[in-house]
Every structure is written in structure tokens, then in C-alpha cells.
């Protein structure tokens, strides 16, 4: 158990940064699941688009966890490509992939049917994560370590 600030500071910047991304992703997952569960209590616009936007933000945070130390724009571009590929994959329907989509996890990860609006939600979610991180790095606040974990 870590008990002093000296011990916390001795943890590598890469590990600290990855921990921040995982923690943020966990909060976003909880918010995303809540947006689905309490859809009826949300304003119509949020009920319709919050889940997909938060899914993309979560994906950005997970990509950032894996690629900590890479430029924000690189991580955003990789995440956007992955999100768009998942959405485009929804145009493909075969029994094997549709059976995966029918599971809870498969449905959450792969989705069910292609929607153009989802591409907008993904772009907004990834832009939100990217701009938030850029703002934190640029204007202060909690420090995310600049690491070179290549």
C-alpha cells in the first residue's frame, strides 16, 4: 500500500498517467450505462445521443491508456478510425456476428445497426476527450504527465 507522497511520486509517470485514463474511463462507463438505464428520465436529445457519445469518449480513454505518451491528435485519429470501423461493421450481418451482437457486451461494443448520427456522436465524444486533455495540459489543473512510453 502506498502511504506517502514520496512513494506516490516514485511511481513512473507512465503508470500514473495510465491510472488517470483508466479512472476516467471507468467514470465514463458508469455514466454511459446510466444514460441507457435512465433514458426515460433524460431530455430526449440526451437520451438519444449521450450513450454513443460517451462510448466514443470511453474508447478514446482506453486508446490513451494503451498509447500513453503519444500525441493527443494521434490518439484521437486512431480512436476515430476504430469507432468509424465499428459503426461501418454494423452494415455487415451474418449469423455469427449477429449472435455476438445479441449478447449484452457484444451489443454494447459492436452496436446493432448503422446510423449516420452515430458518426457525429463519435466525433463529438472523441473531440471532447481530446480538447479536455489539451485544455488540462495547456491551462493547468491536474497534471497528466507527458511521458515517452513508446
Image (spheres, rainbow, N blue to C red):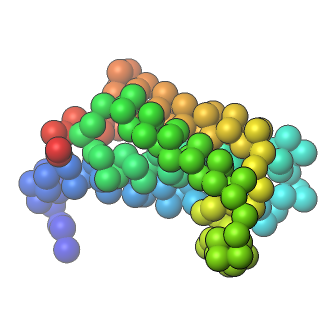
State the residue in front, 135 or 99: 99
> Is residue 10 toward the left or the right of residue 121 in the image?
left
Q: Residue at x 68, y 38 (%)?
A: 119
67 is higher (above) or lower (below) than 34: above
Q: How many marks?
A: 0
State the residue in front, 43 or 106: 106
> Is residue 106 toward the left or the right of residue 146 in the image?
right
Q: Position of residue 9 (x, y in %)?
A: 13, 51
129 is higher (above) or lower (below) than 24: above
Image quadrant in which you'd find residue 123: top right
Quadrant the N terminus occupies: bottom left
Specify whether residue 123 is in view.
yes
Q: Position of residue 15 (x, y in %)?
A: 22, 55
Specify whether residue 141 is in view.
no
60 is higher (above) or lower (below) than 105: above
Question: Residue at the top extreme?
Answer: 139
Q: Residue at x 72, y 53 (%)?
A: 91
Image quadrant in which you'd find residue 43: top right
Quadrant the C terminus occupies: top left
State the residue in front, 104 or 19: 104
Q: Position of residue 81 (x, y in %)?
A: 50, 40
Q: Residue at x 90, y 59 (%)?
A: 40
Q: Position of residue 114 (x, y in %)?
A: 75, 50
105 is higher (above) or lower (below) than 67: below
Amino acid at each position: 500500500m502506498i502511504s506517502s507522497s514520496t512513494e506516490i511520486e516514485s511511481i513512473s509517470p507512465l503508470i500514473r498517467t495510465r491510472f488517470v485514463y483508466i479512472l476516467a474511463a471507468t467514470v465514463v462507463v458508469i455514466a454511459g450505462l446510466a444514460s441507457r438505464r435512465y433514458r426515460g428520465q433524460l431530455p430526449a436529445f440526451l437520451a438519444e445521443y449521450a450513450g454513443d457519445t460517451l462510448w466514443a469518449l470511453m474508447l478514446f480513454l482506453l486508446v490513451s491508456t494503451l498509447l500513453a505518451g503519444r500525441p493527443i491528435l494521434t490518439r484521437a485519429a486512431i480512436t476515430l478510425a476504430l469507432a468509424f470501423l465499428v459503426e461501418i461493421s454494423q452494415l455487415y450481418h451474418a449469423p455469427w456476428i449477429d449472435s455476438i451482437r445479441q449478447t449484452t457486451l457484444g451489443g454494447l461494443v459492436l452496436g446493432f445497426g448503422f446510423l449516420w448520427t452515430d458518426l457525429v456522436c463519435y466525433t463529438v465524444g472523441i473531440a471532447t476527450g481530446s480538447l479536455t486533455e489539451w485544455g488540462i495540459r495547456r491551462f493547468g489543473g491536474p497534471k497528466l504527465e507527458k511521458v515517452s512510453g513508446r
